[in-house]
């Protein structure tokens, strides 16, 4: 019996969300989705016992992981996504041996993923509790107790979120992870837009100050809104851009259809994984290097690897280059920062940080995109097998699996690399322009809403509820 069998045996004792005995009706799916969303926001706004206030400095990561530091959802979907990344990497590297096309093997894989997510939830919860959350005055005399208490609450919140994801997947609309991300980003966009108009240094203040530059300053302040709209339009265009491959049914008397492959072939999955990786790089750096010292030849090399300031923010070092940009809503200040700021230890210009981050996000998205098509059976061979089993052939060619595979290999690998790179590049540039909800968040949310719209259309929801069709179509 291998180690995976041991963990599989333990995993069978975990609670599971039973699949529905019959397909849920459209109304039932709406009810379940709304109920989960309400519970998500309750947990999102519930501060854990022992915490004084919400920490700062990780807004990008909080949006992407549907989390809020200091709440029950401090880790958000991070443990779920990270567990998936680890197991897929281990399986792809041959350290694990799961045939994900076999239902029994896939079930074992999913149980191991759930166990690993629970372990990561406790690990991340402890890292956040010990380094990112301000302890309440009531626990000032016993910080150790506060840290343990907060860690347990945060881990339990993450585990509940994992099961809520299962509920939405089986009984609701779309997936829970997508729903939570979209909810968090939408909240951030609304709050950010309001702050741009009525907050300190906002549009109203710009007009109140008067002067010849009032309108120009107001437009510059609204740049995050414009960049958000631009990202929205580009993503919608990308979602609608497809490569059509002509196909026909064998024996179908010449009937020709087309098989559409979208430009964003692997959707937003690569950038979700890339964002989760970036989050854990930053979190690990703070946990491992804050206040630490390691000297070589009398020189402390820790600040050159990761320099963490007194506010527990990663602000310099090699690892800083791979951390998100912090444009925020004050775009004028950030433009000055890009032009003039250098880090305190290595003297890295902020524009170098911006370029490195965007390239890292784009290339990492490509890596995860290539890996995802293999694990999700979206590679050319898997698609060719599915088409052959459906008695479909490429128009103009005889029905041969080798020909089918060769033709699909002309499209799928290229679309995987190009789509993953573009989606990472778009997210990075949107972050640079200060898009509300972060560029990655907007990109993910538009894709999520688009696929939710397609799913609703397939469920004939718009025929059942014409008023809803009038709003969305």
Image (cartoon, helix red, strand yellow):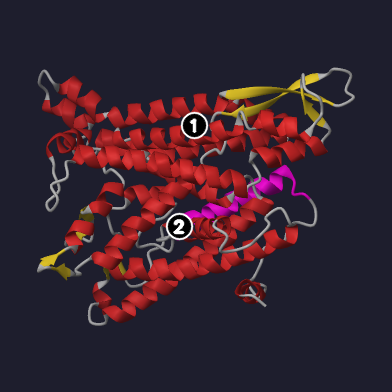
Work out whether residue 95 or residue 285 is closer to the camera in this orientation and state it. Answer: 95
24 is within the stretch colored magenta? yes
SS assignment for the magenta stretch, majority: helix
Residue at (50%, 50%) from the top-left corner? 180
The label shown at residue 418 is: 1
Task: Please provide the residue range marked out in magenta.
Answer: 23-43
Image position of 11 with respect to 265: above or below: below
Gap between marks 2 and 1 measured at Cα: 26 Å
**Total labels drawn:** 2
Mark 2 and mark 1 in contact? Answer it, CB < 8 Å.
no
Work out whether residue 243 or residue 170 is closer to the camera in this orientation and state it. Answer: 243
Is residue 124 in view? yes
Residue 197 falls left or right of residue 150: left
Q: Quadrant of the C terminus?
A: top right
Is residue 182 in view? no
Element type where label 1 sits in the image? helix
**Residue located beneath label 2 in the image:** 78
Residue 86 falls left or right of residue 387: left
């Amino acid at each position: 019996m291998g180690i995976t069998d041991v963990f599989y045996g333990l995993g069978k004792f975990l609670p599971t969300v039973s699949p529905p005995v019959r397909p849920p009706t459209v109304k039932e799916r709406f009810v379940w989705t709304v109920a989960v969303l309400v519970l998500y926001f309750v947990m999102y706004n519930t501060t854990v016992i022992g915490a004084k206030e919400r920490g700062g400095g990780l807004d990008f990561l909080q949006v992407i992981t549907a989390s809020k530091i200091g709440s029950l959802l401090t880790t958000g979907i991070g443990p779920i996504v990270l567990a998936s990344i680890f197991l897929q990497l281990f399986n792809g590297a041959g350290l694990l041996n799961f045939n994900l096309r076999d239902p029994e093997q896939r079930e074992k894989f999913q149980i191991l993923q759930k166990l690993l997510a629970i372990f990561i939830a406790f690990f991340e919860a402890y890292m956040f509790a010990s380094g990112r959350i301000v302890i309440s005055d009531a626990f000032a005399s016993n910080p150790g107790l506060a840290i343990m208490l907060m860690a347990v609450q945060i881990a339990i919140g993450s585990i509940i979120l994992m099961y809520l994801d299962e509920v939405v997947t089986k009984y609701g609309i779309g997936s829970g992870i997508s729903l939570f991300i979209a909810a968090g980003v939408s909240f951030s966009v609304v709050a950010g837009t309001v702050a741009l108009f009525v907050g300190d240094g906002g549009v109203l203040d710009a007009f109140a100050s008067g002067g010849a530059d009032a309108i120009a300053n107001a437009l510059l302040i609204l740049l995050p809104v414009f960049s958000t709209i631009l990202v929205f339009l580009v993503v919608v265009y990308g979602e609608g851009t497809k490569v059509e491959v002509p196909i026909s049914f064998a024996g179908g008397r010449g009937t020709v259809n087309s098989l559409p492959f979208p430009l964003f072939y692997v959707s937003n999955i690569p950038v979700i994984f890339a964002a989760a990786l970036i989050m854990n790089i930053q979190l690990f750096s703070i946990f491992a290097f804050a206040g630490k010292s390691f000297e070589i030849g009398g020189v402390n090399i820790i600040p050159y690897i990761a320099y963490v300031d007194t506010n527990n923010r990663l602000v310099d070092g090699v690892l800083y280059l791979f951390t998100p940009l912090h444009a925020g809503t004050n775009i004028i200040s950030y433009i000055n920062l890009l032009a003039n700021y250098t880090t305190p230890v290595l003297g890295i210009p902020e524009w170098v940080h911006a370029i490195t981050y965007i390239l890292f996000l784009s290339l990492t998205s490509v890596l995860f995109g290539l890996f995802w098509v293999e694990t999700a059976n979206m590679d050319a061979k898997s698609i060719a097998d599915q088409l052959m089993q459906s008695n479909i052939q490429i128009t103009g060619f005889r029905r041969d699996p080798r020909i089918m595979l060769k033709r699909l290999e002309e499209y799928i690998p290229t679309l995987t690399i190009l789509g993953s790179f573009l989606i990472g590049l778009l997210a990075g540039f949107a972050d640079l322009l200060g898009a509300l909800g972060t560029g990655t968040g907007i990109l993910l949310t538009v894709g999520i809403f688009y696929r939710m719209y397609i799913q609703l259309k397939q469920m004939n929801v718009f025929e059942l509820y014409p008023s809803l069709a009038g709003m969305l179509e």
